Amino acid sequence: MAATRRGATAKSSAKIPQLPWHDVRPAPVVLVSGPQDLFADRAIKGLRDFLRAEDPSLEINDIEAAAYQPGELVTLASPSLFAEPRLIRVSGVEKCTDAFLSEAIEYLAAPAESAYLVLRHAGGMRGKKLLDAVRAASGAAIEIVCNDIKKDAEKFDFAKAEFARANKRITPGALRQVVSAFSDDVAELAAACQQLIADSADQITEGVVDRYYGGRVETTAFAVADIALAGRTAEALVGLRHALDSGADPVPVVAAFAMKVRAMAKVANAHGSSAQLASSLGMAPWQVDRARRDARGWTDEGLGRAILALAEADAAVKGAERDPVFAVERLIGVIASRGGV
């Protein structure tokens, strides 16, 4: 993709291959860099699946760089009695401890045989010495560049590639429609594409997109929810009015809030990396990360009040109250104040 190529060009001094997420391949050390968690998660999963297909006995271990204990990397990379291949996934390298930083740089000089070390660095200056060392490790490392895609043309190309990889046909109008509906969030755009890909229709048409997403209704609902979660009450109320004027119904607006709050509740007191929590919570790693970001600044009491407000709003928009719009406005107030009273 264009954004990925630009990211690679920006680091042209690197002595190792710099590849897009969908071209990931095994190497003793794989640096997965950049802020786009969706692409990073896909790259890491793709590498895992490739290695597991080659050898089902693959041993997988996860390390949180921010909570790293001295000697952990060497211990996990050391061959076991039966010499199974090892995949070691390190999350949060941008928050790494000094111990991890020094030991990872030392490890680069002599990577363990049959071990694959994946370093996930989402951005920032912390760990730069390690990144420089990886990018200089010619023959031992590769980098998977996971930049954000922000331009409409890049999002269009991304969605088009999603359908092409799945050998699913989509009309140009339907493609424009789904990209327009989910242009604010690449992860939600990807999820929408996957849902459409799963449809039994031979070709995805504008009618199919309408059936799933009702034009821009759901994306407007998610946009209102995101603005409210950011604490911008007035802006969220204006967004709600715009959505309603555009034909949105209060029911899917409340559903969008419910999806966000449910995810926040799942991760509120959960411990572990996003990769570790994803399977146990029934979420993708990027969804765990997003929910954690949304939940910052919330208390358990505030979250509880938000859940009660959601239940009241859900009943109201389904006929329990005479003014469903006021019920949604009331919900926005609760969400924007982080469950405040």
Image (cartoon, rainbow, N blue to C red):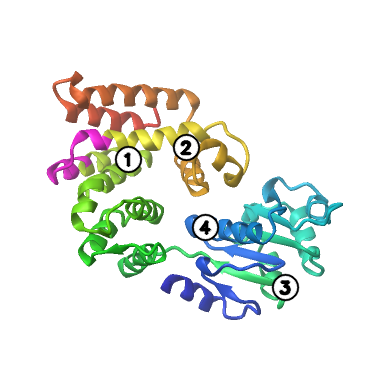
| Closest to the observer, 23 or 287 | 23
Q: Which residue is drawn at 50% across and 72% down?
A: 7
State which tag comes first along the sequence, 2 or 4: 4
Q: In this view, does 336 lie to the left or right of 59?
A: left
Q: Name the residue under label 2.
A: 295
Relative to the observer, which residue lies in front, 90 or 292?
90
In the rendered image, the vertical position of residue 16 relative to residue 244, given as above or below = below
Q: Which of marks 2 and 3 is nearer the N terminus?
A: 3
According to the picture, the residue beneath numbered tag 3 turns out to be: 140
What residue do we see at 32% from left, 38% from top? 256
Instruction: Report crowding for label 4: few under 14, some 14 to 19, many 20 or more residues within 10 A (C-alpha).
Output: some
In the picture, measured across the screen, residue 47 lies left or right of residue 255, that is right
The answer to whether residue 122 of the structure is visible from this angle is no
Q: What residue type is labelled 3?
A: Ala
Q: Position of residue 35 (x, y in %)?
A: 50, 59
Residue at image mark 1: 225
